[in-house]
Amino acid sequence: MRVSCNFSSVVGVSAIIVLAMLNSGCDYTKKVIAKDKLNQGAISYNQGKTKEAQQYFKDALSWDDKSAIAHLFYGATLVKDYKNLSGDERKKLANEALQTYKKALELTTNNCRNTDNALLYIASIYEDLEDQDNWREWILKRTEGDCSNKDLKATTYYTVAVKFWEAAKSQTDRYQDKTAQDPFHYRNMDYPAAQADRQKTDESITKGLEYIDKALQVDPEYVQAMYYRSLLYRQKQMMTKEEPKRKEIEALAKKITDDASVIEKRKEEEAAKKQKEEAAAKPQG
C-alpha cells in the first residue's frame, strides 16, 4: 500500500519510516521506502531468487521512478527472463529491458560505473536481437564522454573490429575451396550471384582495419589487436586475386604477427620479473 502525502494510516511500514515521513515529507518517505525495497531486491537477486527480486525492484520503482539503480537492477531481471524465451515473447521482453536500461542511462549522472553498465547491457541486448548496427552504435558510446579512458577506448575499438573480422570470415569460409592446400587462397566471388557477398566482405575488412587501427592508435602495444590486424590482412589476402599483391599482403600479415610476438614475449618477461620482485619484497616467515 502506498503512503499518502496526507499521512493516512499505513500497513506494514515501520515506525522509523513513519517518523521519517512526519519529519521530512512525502518525497523523502518515498525514497526511504524505495531504498528499502531496492535493498531487499538485491538480497533476493544475490540469492538467486530472480522473480522475487524483480517484484522488489518493481516496487522500488513504484515509489521512486527516478532511481537509476532500481532501473539497472530491474533491467537485469528482465534480461534473465528473456534469455529463457523465444520468438515474439523474447523480443517483446528484450525491448522492455532496452527501455529500462535507456531510462537508467538518462537518470545516471556523474556515475561512470552505472553509465558503463547501462551501455554494456543495451549493446548486449541488441546483440541478442541480432541487430549489429545498433550493437555497434551503443558499444561505441563507451568511448565518448568523461567516463571514457585509454583502456576502455582501446578494448571497445578492438571489440568492434573483431566483429567485422567475424563477418568477413563467415563469407570467406563459405567460398573456401576445400581441396586447396593454401588456407589463404583466393576466394572466387567474380560472378554476379556472389557480388553482394564480395561487397559485404570487402566492407567488413575495411571497417575492421579502421577500428583495429583506432585501437592501436590508443595503445600501440595492444598485442591482441595486433594479432587481429594480421588476421584482417589475411582476409584481405583471400579477397585479392593478383599474385604479386597477395604476396605483399602476406608479408605484411606475417610482419605484424612477428612484431606482436616480440612485444608479447617482452611483456611476459616483464610481468614475471615484477612478480618475482614482489615475492622477494614480502616479509619472510
Image (cartoon, rainbow, N blue to C red):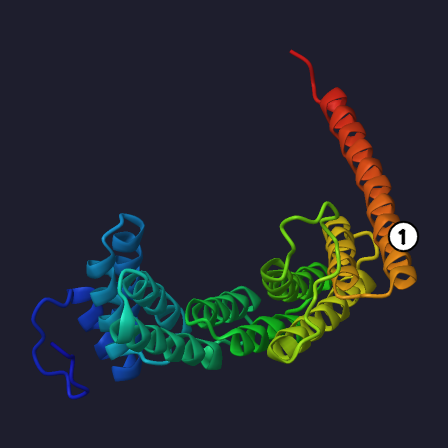
Q: Residue at x 35, y 69 (%)?
A: 75
Type of amino acid at the residue the image marks with label 1: Ala
Residue at the farthest top position: 285
Q: Name the residue under label 1.
A: 251
Give the percent coordinates (x, y) of residue 71.
36, 72
Say whether residue 29 is visible: no
Give the percent coordinates (x, y) of residue 171.
61, 65
- Write down the quadrant of residue 172 in the picture: bottom right
Residue at disc 1, secondary structure: helix
Q: Give the side of residue 127 with respect to residue 268, left or right.
A: left
Q: In which quarter of the image is the C terminus?
A: top right
- Write down the quadrant of residue 58 in the picture: bottom left
**Circle 1 crowding by C-alpha within 10 Å: few under 14, some 14–19, many from 20:** some
Give the percent coordinates (x, y) of residue 44.
25, 54
Q: Residue at x 50, y 70 (%)?
A: 123
Say whether residue 75 is visible: yes
Give the percent coordinates (x, y) of residue 29.
26, 76
Q: Give the side of residue 185 with respect to residue 87, left or right.
A: right
Between 282 and 181, the residue placed more toward the observer is 181
- Write down the quadrant of residue 63 in the picture: bottom left
